[in-house]
Amino acid sequence: MFDGVAKRYDITNTVLSFGQDRGWRRATRAALDLRPGETVLDLAAGTGVSTAELGRSGAWCVAADFSKGMLTAGLSRKLPMVAGDAMALPFADDAFDAATISFGLRNVADHEAGLREIRRVVRPGGRLVVCEFSTPVFPAFRTLYMEYLMKALPAVARAVSSNPDAYVYLAESIRAWPDQAELARRLEKAGWSDVTWRNLTGGIVTLHRAVNS
């Protein structure tokens, strides 16, 4: 499915988010508090647009994704790229100072196993930021957002995406995803500590930040 949307993935995301995706990437980089020379894993990196944003910090960043089609679509960015499964990452223990996964945790078959695997490859004291769709905090806005997800989003995707059916899955997976507090509990269950979160765009997207204790 992700191979099928790779060709127009970046432009589709920008259109569907009304350009908010750029700000979400910047906020993710800021939340990681990266320093020059640190090593960072960008998991579910897709075409590497998020990895390129992380690289502006001066950290050394590697893009990893399960979809080879997505990575291939981003080859022009000249970034280190690795095809890998989030539940069995091809990296040594404690290999990274920090890690992030943006809009990808929903797509890991067992996301709690994925969170444990990320913890394995991040050194003790290292950081994780999960940028993911979440639950809008205001009831009226939440209702409007759900209407957009289930009705307008698939229609817009038909106009701009190379695989519109994938965006029906996107809407359904967002609707089924746990809210902010529940995802925080799952991070703690996977062994992460000092879990906090920050809502972006009224809770449409949330940044969860945690430390590998």
Image (cartoon, rainbow, N blue to C red):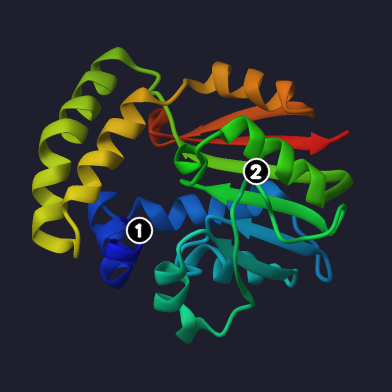
Picture coordinates of residue 142 (x, y %)? Answer: 28, 21
Q: Nearer the viewer, mark 2 or mark 1?
A: 1
Q: Earlier in the sequence, mark 2 or mark 1?
A: 1
Picture coordinates of residue 154 (x, y %)? Answer: 14, 44
| 140 lies left or right of 34 | left
| 4 lies left or right of 194 | left
**Residue farthest to the top?**
139
Q: Is residue 50 above or below residue 75?
A: above
Q: Nearer the viewer, residue 115 or 22?
A: 115
User: Which residue type carries mark 2?
Assistant: Val
For the point 73% across and 27% down, the residue is: 190
Packing grade of label 2 (10 A; few <14, some 14-19, many >=20) is many
Q: Is residue 115 above or below residue 67?
A: above
Residue at the spot of label 2: 129
Picture coordinates of residue 201 (x, y %)? Answer: 39, 36
Q: Is residue 154 above or below residue 145?
A: below
Packing grade of label 1 (10 A; few <14, some 14-19, many >=20) is some
